[in-house]
Image: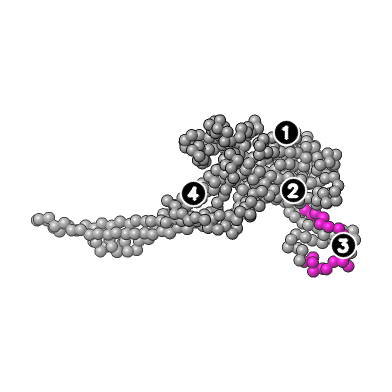
Amino acid sequence: MAGLALLALAGCGVPASVIQSRHWDLNEMMRETANEQLLLNIVRLRYDETPYFLQIGSVTTSFSAGANAGAQATLPDGAPNVFGASAGVTYAETPTVTWGLPDSRELLGRLHAPMGADQLTVLTQSGLDPATVLRVGVKKVNRLRNLEFDLKRGIYEPESHGAFIEMLGLLEVLLREGVVDLSYGVYSNAAGGKIPMSKIDTRAMAEALPSGMQFMTRDNPNVFEPLKLSKPLFLRFAARSNADPRALRLRDLLDLDPTRQSFAIIDTGGSGTEQLLSESGRQSRVLDDTAPLREIVVNNRSVMEVLRFASAYVAVPSGDLAAGVVRRRSAPSGGAWLTVEAADAPPADAWLAVERDGSWFYIRANDLDTRLSFTVLNAIFASVVGEVPGAKPLLTLPVR
């Protein structure tokens, strides 16, 4: 009988169910760690501290199985011999996480550079509410200004902010009803003056293609015009929008050219018109209150601006305010999109919580609006900053 037990143990291994269970545990640990790091840095910015980010370089784990077996015999007087066998199997796992220190210049460049329009509009096509994405990431759309942030004053409200919010509300409703839609299309910007064919090295045409540059002819087949091609998102108006007062109001708020039905959503750097006007020293169309606009030109926040903006919605303990270690800032009233609360002890109803200097900062589990806004923040950070290449290993830790 003992021989049978030993034979059974000889082929023992780690069952797939054990590996699968630990896989999900590690996945949850990485997700929770990333969320906590983002929230902690938002809290740091509320205290005017320097944010700091680490990134996970690698996660490795190894499994092992062990077995033990034994046999015993009982020989009581006047009874048949009794033999018994015992066996056991144990599993062990050793997960290891290596943290990386991102290159500071690369990280700062990604944090402080304004986001491109394409980096924001791609999020509007991923299921996230376009109005929420634009409210968080955009400083200005055409002539409408969003809330802005100042290090000393905190958030302040420009005169056109009310119209900005109205525009976002109309956009949300009209998208839902199909009166307007968002669709990617090809967009060309003038990249220079016209060039006679005799002055062009045709080899340059092929070499320019990978960078999105093409040489096109219009009226004269012997004269080429260099164009920079891109594929931005377009806001398109349906035919029935011409009789819809809400769509007409949206056009009015954005100062859109009434003769056009489709408008590219681009940043200032992607607008050939704005670039040429700036280079020539002429008046920008966006800054000319009388000029109808043929584009939707957005000025975006940087990721750092987005995080500072979010930090204004972090509540702080009254003791820190009394001690003067944090500025007295109040977020705008009405329609708060993010609420981070403070507590003296670990909160029981937290969806996400971090500890800083003895205080706990958290998002309530039932605050669904804040959870959605935090998801948008996370998506913006991941899509713009992401994993910084060339990060050097900093610390390797076993995970319990």
- Residue at x-position 80% and y-position 45%: 261
- Residue at x-position 89% and y-position 64%: 196
SS label for mark 1? helix
The residue where tag 4 is placed is 29
SS label for mark 2? strand
Query: Would you call the spot at circle 1 few (<14 residues within 10 Å), some (14-19), or many (20 or more)?
Result: some
CA gap, disc 2 and disc 4: 37 Å
Position of residue 7 measured from the top left corner of the image (x, y, whole percent): 29, 64
Q: Are marks 1 and 4 in contact (CB under 8 Å)?
A: no
Q: Residue furthest left?
A: 78
SS label for mark 3? strand
Position of residue 208 measured from the top left corner of the image (x, y, whole percent): 77, 63
- Residue at x-position 51% and y-position 40%: 356
Q: Which mark is residue 195?
A: 3
- Residue at x-position 60% and y-position 40%: 48
Position of residue 312 measured from the top left corner of the image (x, y, whole percent): 62, 37
> Seen in the image, is 192 located left or right of residue 361?
right
Vertical comparison of 90 with 300: above or below: below
First reached walking from the N terminus: tag 4 or tag 3: 4
Position of residue 84 measured from the top left corner of the image (x, y, whole percent): 21, 57
Q: Which mark is residue 162?
A: 1
Kind of residue at disc 4: Met
Q: Which residues are magenta?
A: 187-206
Vertical comparison of 97 with 140: above or below: below
The residue where tag 2 is placed is 267
Q: Say which of 358 and 291 sits in front.
A: 358
